[in-house]
Image: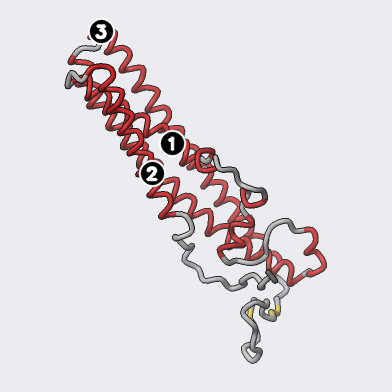
Amino acid sequence: MLEPDATVRVSPHEDPPTSFGPDALQILTTEHWSLLAARSLVYTEAMSRTSIFVAALTGSVVALALVAQADDFGSGFVAFALVLLPVVYFLGVVTIARLAQVNRENRLWVQGMNRIRNAYLQLAPELEPYFVTSRYDDEAEILRSSLAAQRPLTRMQPFISAPGVVAVIDSVVEGAIAGIAGVGLDLGVVGALAVGAVFFLLSMAFFAFWARGQVGRVPTGLDPMFPSPERPS
């Protein structure tokens, strides 16, 4: 259905001449809706994984409060906390890792929708002024088609996104683990708070370093077919 003429040489920044069959529009529309459904499932899973982590943390805090009331913050409370909270921290780490995978999947769906939008505009070029998302499928245009890329991002953006929120909460859990361990080692209140603060910062640094290595370095796996034209500086 979508067969470019092999005898025509095309510039890498121009759309290849394409002849569409009579069923092309219906096929493209069906695929577009399939990608929209996939994006919806991606967002649903992201929110579900985040909710599972928050629910697990909430239940752990309630359990710790009950044990603390029964044991008066004694050795039993310390032992229980050092068993329970590392599990919660692990759940937070894998939640962030899964959210990163979900974001990569979402980039793939957006790239596919950009390609389909390019085909729409080949069928009806006069409709281009009415499209607010990109028709090109390179990395820059994938970001342009995303929600956040349509407006300037704030310096707080890493903490506004779901992975950033989970990273901060999980780092607090790590700090609590270290602080409770400090209490168990008789470091005193000040010593326990200092140890907890250090481990909180170390955890945040770990997540920030890991996220920096992920942003913009994990392609969708598909080479751009319709790269954006070069714009004058």
Q: Is residue 180 left or right of residue 206?
A: left
Q: CA distance from mark 1 to mark 3?
A: 30 Å
Q: Is residue 27 visible?
A: no
**Residue at image location 47% in from the left, 49% down from the top:** 102
Q: Nearer the viewer, residue 187 or 14?
A: 187
Label 2 Cα crowd, 10 Å radius (few <14 / some 14-19 / many 20+): many
Q: Position of residue 196 (x, y in %)?
A: 30, 28
Nearer the N terminus, badge 1 or badge 2?
Answer: 1
Please tell me whether mark 1 sits on a helix, a strand or a loop. helix
Q: Is residue 163 visible?
A: yes
State which mark lies toward you, 1 or 3.
1
- In the rendered view of the protein, which quadrant contains the N terminus? bottom right
Q: CA distance from mark 2 to mark 3?
A: 35 Å
Q: Quadrant of residue 76?
A: top left
Q: How is the image coloured?
A: secondary structure
Q: Using the image, determine if residue 196 lies above or below residue 202.
A: above
- Per the image, the residue denoted by label 3 is 70
**Residue at image location 31% in from the left, 26% down from the top:** 176
Q: Using the image, determine if residue 15 lies above or below residue 176.
A: below
Q: Using the image, determine if residue 142 lies above or below residue 224.
A: above
- Per the image, the residue denoted by label 1 is 166
- Per the image, the residue denoted by label 2 is 207
Q: Are marks 1 and 3 in contact (CB under 8 Å)?
A: no
Q: Nearer the viewer, residue 119 or 229?
A: 229
Amino acid type of disc 2?
Phe
Furthest toward the right, the residue is 126
Q: Is residue 216 left or right of residue 207?
A: right
Amino acid type of disc 3?
Ala
State which mark lies toward you, 1 or 2.
2
